[in-house]
Amino acid sequence: MGALKPWHIAVLVVVLILLFGAKRLPDAARSLGRSLRIIKAETKSLHDDDRDLAEKADAQSGYQPLPPQQQQFAQPQQPVAPPVDPVQRVREN
């Protein structure tokens, strides 16, 4: 049911020629080829970047973490007043 028959392709070609004209079809095919080439190059570079990041992560996994630092006791802070709603402040005045 999903197989393309030769007459399906012929009808598609005729419709494309009627819609775009015979002069524009080669330019459209050329620009489609360029776009596909660009997409292929970009996906390959993304794949290479991911592989490079994975190699860096593997190389850095041999490092030992720093020992935890001792926390110094903080001086007690003075109590902070709760925030005041500006609308309520205007109503009180």
Image (cartoon, rainbow, N blue to C red):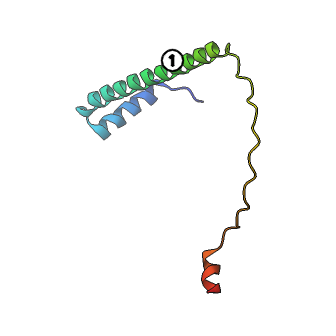
Q: In this view, does 63 lie above or below 82?
A: above
Q: For this rendering, which residue is in front, 88 or 12? A: 88
What percent of the width, then of the height, locates residue 53?
Answer: 56, 20
In screen coordinates, is 78 left or right of 53? right
Q: How many labels does the image show?
A: 1
Identify the residue shown where x is 56% and y is 17%: 51
The quadrant in which residue 34 appears is: top left
Q: In this view, does 51 lie above or below 16?
A: above
Identify the residue shown where x is 70% and y is 67%: 81
Identify the residue shown where x is 62% and y is 18%: 57
Quadrant of the drawing holding the C terminus: bottom right
What percent of the width, then of the height, locates residue 92?
Answer: 65, 85
What percent of the width, then of the height, locates residue 59?
Answer: 62, 13
Residue that extends furthest to the left in the rendered view of this protein:
23
Q: Which element carries disc 1, helix, strand or loop?
A: helix
Quadrant of the drawing holding the N terminus: top right
Q: Name the residue under label 1.
A: 48
Q: For this rendering, which residue is in front, 43 or 87? A: 87
Identify the residue shown where x is 67% and y is 15%: 63
Q: In this view, does 75 lie above or below 57?
A: below
In screen coordinates, is 25 left or right of 56? left
Rate crowding at label 1 as few (under 14), some (14 to 19) or many (20 or more) other CA atoms within 10 Å. Answer: few
Disc 1 marks a residue whose amino acid type is Asp
In screen coordinates, is 28 left or right of 9? left
Q: For this rendering, which residue is in front, 1 or 82? A: 82
What percent of the width, then of the height, locates residue 46?
Answer: 50, 23
Q: For this rendering, which residue is in front, 71 or 21? A: 71
Q: In this view, does 15 lie above or below 90?
A: above
